[in-house]
């Protein structure tokens, strides 16, 4: 018994010392990481982690339900698609044709109203907010300097950095895009309680506007610029500019660094397949919704066009692809969250789930992405 008491005493001292050391050295956010991720059986951020963070609510307006096709759910998922969905933990698979829901399937007790984390699909939402702010004259253009909003970036190469550079992933900032390292700035940003401080500590290390390099910090800094320009939280701006006008069926949630704090703009917008698809429809329609131009068509055209020749897969906040004669664009998030748009065929495909298959060919697109495309079209081909 004495040994046990002594052991517990020293064990407690060691644990307390480690916690103190983490906070003193600036790694206190790891305590939050352990509590919210590892204690729930995960090694990285997961679909339902919004339950364990503070959130800002994105209110809905008057819902505008999607129409359902006369073929709604009459065509079964292909064997290959069903197999992949189960193996990769798909929770929602939705195919919309001609603005009508053609097929939708949910797994693991999720349904059309269930929320899940969008991860980096949120980057497309932030880019849309940039377009809205330019359209409203709150931001001058894609060429407005970031230093106009944050003088911290008036030094070195960062002085040339524009909001357009942030949206197109060409900032030249020293961000470490590592999702699994506990010591990367990406991990710190996810769990830290002062996200603005983290981002404002970034430095320019490369010439901005010259080449593509995917960095989540770009989107976070862009969101901070938009909030300053709009004079309101990004969550409220999304609600007023898009969520309400597009008739979302459900309110959404956006994780914040602390209560009533800054949203994690590069990720963590929680909603459902049908409501995520509305952004795909808006861009497919070049910014028009119910006959009203809620986002500038020229901005959208630029957004879904590659900025750099050596990065044909990315525009401004949207991923781009050409596959089997199909040209399209898509929102994309960690673990295989997709809103895929093929304008020529008037098709939108949404997949939400727990894991994905990394590219095995060197393509910037994940292997599973092509399966969703192929199999959705195989289903559409069976219509009468």
Image (tube, rainbow, N blue to C red):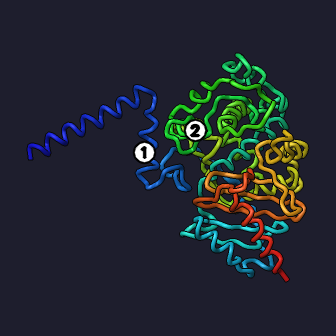
In this orientation, does residue 161 appear?
Answer: yes
- Image coordinates of residue 56 in percent, x first then y, are 58, 44
Query: How many numbered marks, from 0 up?
Result: 2
- Image coordinates of residue 87 in percent, x first then y, are 58, 68
The structure residue drawn at horizontal position 67% and vertical position 32%, both measured from the top left corner, is: 221
Which is more toward the observer, 257 or 294? 257
In this rendering, the answer to whether 22 lies above or below 303 is: above
The Cα atoms of the two marked residues, 2 and 1, are separated by: 15 Å
The numbered dot on residue 186 is 2
Badge 2, how many Cα within 10 Å: few under 14, some, many 20+? Answer: many
The structure residue drawn at horizontal position 67% and vertical position 39%, both measured from the top left corner, is: 234
In this rendering, the answer to whether 109 lies above or below 192 is: below
For residue 148, which quarter of the picture? Answer: top right
The structure residue drawn at horizontal position 50% and vertical position 34%, both measured from the top left corner, is: 193
Badge 1, how many Cα within 10 Å: few under 14, some, many 20+? Answer: some
- Image coordinates of residue 250 in percent, x first then y, are 65, 58
Which is more toward the observer, 184 or 246? 184
Q: Earlier in the sequence, mark 2 or mark 1?
A: 1
Taking the image as shown, residue 92 lies to the left or right of residue 311, namely left
Residue at label 1? 34
Q: Quadrant of the C terminus?
A: bottom right
Taking the image as shown, residue 31 lies to the left or right of residue 102, namely left
In this orientation, does residue 244 appear?
Answer: no
Which is more toward the observer, 38 or 192? 38
The numbered dot on residue 330 is none
């Amino acid at each position: 018994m004495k040994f046990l008491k002594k052991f517990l005493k020293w064990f407690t001292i060691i644990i307390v010392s480690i916690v103190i050391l983490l906070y003193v050295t600036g790694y206190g956010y790891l305590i939050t990481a352990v509590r919210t991720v590892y204690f729930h059986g995960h090694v990285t951020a997961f679909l339902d982690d919004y339950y364990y963070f503070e959130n800002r609510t994105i209110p809905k307006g008057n819902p505008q339900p999607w129409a359902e096709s006369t073929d709604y759910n009459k065509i079964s998922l292909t064997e290959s698609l069903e197999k992949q969905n189960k193996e990769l933990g798909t929770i929602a698979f939705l195919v919309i044709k001609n603005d009508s829901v053609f097929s939708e399937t949910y797994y693991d007790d999720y349904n059309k109203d269930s929320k899940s984390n969008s991860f980096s699909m949120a980057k497309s939402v932030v880019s849309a907010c940039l377009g809205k702010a330019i359209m409203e004259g709150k931001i001058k253009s894609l060429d407005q300097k970031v230093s106009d909003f944050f003088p911290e970036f008036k030094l070195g190469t960062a002085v040339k950095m524009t909001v357009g550079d942030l949206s197109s992933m060409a900032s030249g900032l020293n961000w470490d895009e590592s999702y699994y390292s506990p010591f990367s700035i990406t991990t710190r940003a996810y769990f830290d309680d002062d996200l603005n401080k983290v981002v404002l500590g970034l430095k320019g290390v490369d010439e901005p506007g010259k080449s593509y390099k995917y960095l989540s910090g770009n989107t976070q800094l862009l969101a901070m610029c938009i909030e300053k320009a709009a004079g309101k939280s990004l969550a409220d701006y999304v609600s007023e500019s898009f969520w309400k006008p597009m008739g979302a069926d459900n309110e959404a949630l956006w994780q914040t660094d602390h209560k009533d704090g800054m949203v994690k703009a590069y990720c963590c917008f929680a909603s459902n397949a049908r409501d995520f698809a509305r952004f795909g429809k808006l861009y497919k329609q070049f910014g028009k919704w119910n006959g009203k131009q809620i986002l500038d068509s020229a901005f959208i055209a630029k957004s879904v066009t590659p900025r750099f020749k050596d990065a044909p897969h990315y525009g401004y906040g949207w991923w781009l692809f050409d596959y089997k004669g199909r040209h399209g664009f898509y929102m994309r998030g960690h673990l295989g969250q997709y809103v895929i748009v093929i304008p020529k065929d008037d098709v939108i495909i949404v997949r939400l789930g727990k894991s994905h298959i990394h590219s095995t060919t060197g393509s910037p697109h994940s292997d599973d992405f092509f399966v969703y495309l192929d199999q959705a079209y195989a289903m559409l081909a069976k219509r009468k």
